[in-house]
Image (cartoon, rainbow, N blue to C red):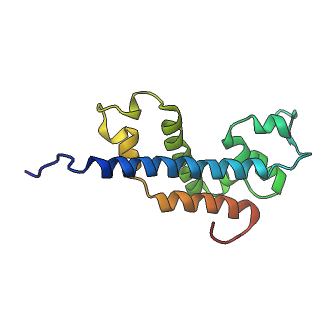
Amino acid sequence: MADSRVTNLQLYSDFFEEAMAGIVLTHSALDGFASEQVPETFRYETDNGGHLSREEVLRRGIELRLTRVLAQASGSPNVRTSNPDLWLRVEELKGVRDRIAHGLGPQFISSEDPMENVFARLAARDFGALLESVEEVIDHYLGPVGPL
């Protein structure tokens, strides 16, 4: 039977610190993009015929801005409906970021389901793919702008 004891706690600690910072910063880049792309004078038309000012839109969640608002503002298709696989990766990024930033529930450090705590989710992430997801969303709305 293999020895499963952690022998270099500092290495693990450094990895998780870097991984959490990377997730939070990657999400922040996406959130910043979603906010900056809403024109100053933009008024979002809601499904029920109402309107939201730019300021009201910016107080809403990133999901609304990345999907319906940017689709309306840019004339591009809604990324959620036009590229569901990409949208799943964006939701994954947001979900991991939310668990890190808000320490949501027992899944943050719970050992009840070890594969669902934040540390297991971080260890299983393909960080390159998450960063590429941000690039793909930007390219979706602006056209290819090259690597970030």
State whether residue 61 is above or below residue 25.
above
In x, y percent, where is residue 64?
71, 41
Q: The C terminus is located in which quarter?
A: bottom right
Q: Is residue 122 visible?
A: yes
Q: Residue furthest front?
A: 10
Tell whether 51 sits left or right of 33. Answer: right
In x, y percent, where is residue 16?
40, 47
In x, y percent, where is residue 32?
70, 49
Tell whether 50 sits left or right of 129. Answer: right
Give the mark count. 0
State whether residue 144 is above or below residue 19.
below
Q: Is residue 47 visible?
A: no
Q: Going 83% across and 32% down the picture, which residue do you hit?
A: 48
Q: Going 43% across and 47% down the picture, which residue do you hit?
A: 17
**Residue in front for this viewpoint, 37 or 75:** 37
Q: Residue furthest top?
A: 105
Q: Going 55% across and 46% down the picture, which residue do you hit?
A: 24
In x, y percent, where is residue 145?
71, 70
Q: Residue furthest right?
A: 41
Q: Where on the picture, by quarter, is residue 147?
A: bottom right
**Residue in front for this viewpoint, 8 or 43:** 8
Tell whether 63 sits left or right of 73. Answer: left
Q: Going 45% across and 51% down the picture, which residue do you hit?
A: 19
**Residue in front for this viewpoint, 8 or 71:** 8
**Residue in front for this viewpoint, 69 or 13:** 13
